[in-house]
Image (cartoon, helix red, strand yellow):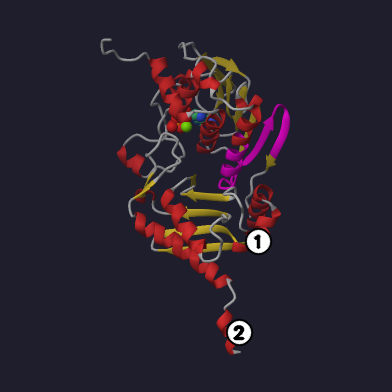
Amino acid sequence: MAIRILPDQLINQIKAGEVVERPSAVVKELVENSLDAGATRVEIEVEQGGLNLIRIRDNGSGIPREELPVALQRHATSKIQNMDDLERVGSLGFRGEALPSILSVSRLTLTSRVADASHGWQVSGAGAYENEEPKPAAHAVGTTVEACDLFYNTPARRKFMKAESTEFRHISQFINRIALCRFDAGFTLKHNQRRTLDLAPADSEPEREARVAQICGDDFVRNAIRIDEQRMGLSLQGWVGLPSFARTQADLQYLYVNGRAVRDKLLGHALRRAFADAMHSTHYPAFVLYLELDPVGVDVNVHPQKTEVRFRESARVHDFLFGAVHQLLRRQRPEPEQHHHA
Ligand code: ADP
Ligand code: MG
């Protein structure tokens, strides 16, 4: 075959394979967009594990009429403009890939209204945007994105979808994960018309702790120690489960770097080592931890899903995390020697 540039929709579908490989990834991209738009309420509704319908409604800033078609274009973003912005990016999104990717594999409707508009506007497309003019639509200030029949036009992908309940579990786990770090927003989740989660914004410390208890269980909060450590531009806060609260699965491990949930080998290693003296190696610690550092010291542009990061000074970050948690656990343990000498 001769070398040719791929058609736009196919490029977007290839991208969609990386960015939105299952319904929970679509939910992730859309909820992150809502939070980036300053939403304090995010309503998530899904049907049949998200395969039939994913609808996310927020009360964020909205998108003006003339920008609606642009939002559906590849590499179109309001969040960064140059390399400097990328180096210090504070928003969850910045690649301008989510909406065009989701559109390329679903029937998508985007409805939005900004504060100074008298009503909302809507654009839609199935697989691609056909450049129709936005239509007027009733909507409060904010945005609703509806994605129906996910992967209807990519049968190979559709075949990889698991049972409805499995896909929904991924969605629900993602909402828990983001709700544990975005206390500034409220979240509701509905599956097949049934409400499974309802969280109001948690502005005070007791409200935040109540949210952690609601998601991780009262038991976890009762068996966790608060951590609050700052050293040389690094900060670690959150809840560290006591070694006695060890789990047989790694199902209660939440780690955020600058407000982003990450899976990171280096940080995982630091935490495993911190617990190593206190816990049997077949068990897993429980924690909800927020690591903060200067955004310039961490590269989030490593992977399309942005769940991986790279640290400029990885050894320093590792040692800080290890040291802070290890010392906290050491202080917690009784010191047998003192009893012997008493
Ligand atoms: P990115 O989030 O990387 O910028 P997206 O494709 O997810 O790319 O979104 C494209 C643009 O559409 C965003 O930069 C933003 O300006 C706008 N947008 C998307 N979703 C929302 C939303 N819920 N509220 C307001 N603006 C939005
Ligand atoms: Mg986005």
Amino acid type, mark 1: Asn
Mark 2 or mark 1, earlier in chain: 1
Label 2 SS: helix
| Residue 40 in view of the camera | no
Please report the residue visible at 40 percent of the width from the left and 58 percent of the height from the top.
Answer: 318
Magenta span: 171-197
Note whether 114 is above or below 323 in the view shown.
above
What percent of the width, then of the height, locates residue 275?
52, 62
Determine crowd level at label 1: few under 14, some 14-19, many 20+ residues with C-alpha closer than 10 A.
Answer: some
Q: Which mark is residue 223?
A: 1
Distance of label 2 from label 1 (alpha carbons): 25 Å
Q: Is residue 179 magenta?
A: yes
Quadrant holding the C terminus: bottom right
Please report the residue visible at 34 percent of the width from the left and 34 percent of the height from the top.
Answer: 81
Note whether 73 is above or below 180 in the view shown.
above
Q: Which mark is residue 339?
A: 2
**Outermost right residue:** 194
What percent of the width, then of the height, locates residue 316?
36, 59
Confirm or deny contact between disc 2 and disc 1 (CB under 8 A): no
| Residue 269 in view of the camera | yes
State which mark lies toward you, 2 or 1. Answer: 2
What percent of the width, then of the height, locates residue 161?
56, 25
Please report the residue visible at 47 percent of the width from the left and 60 percent of the height from the top.
Answer: 273
Give the total number of marks visible in the rendering.
Answer: 2
What percent of the width, then of the height, locates residue 231?
42, 64
Amino acid type, mark 2: His
Taking the image as shown, residue 82 lies to the left or right of residue 293, namely left
Q: Is residue 104 magenta?
A: no
Quadrant holding the N terminus: top left
Label 1 SS: loop
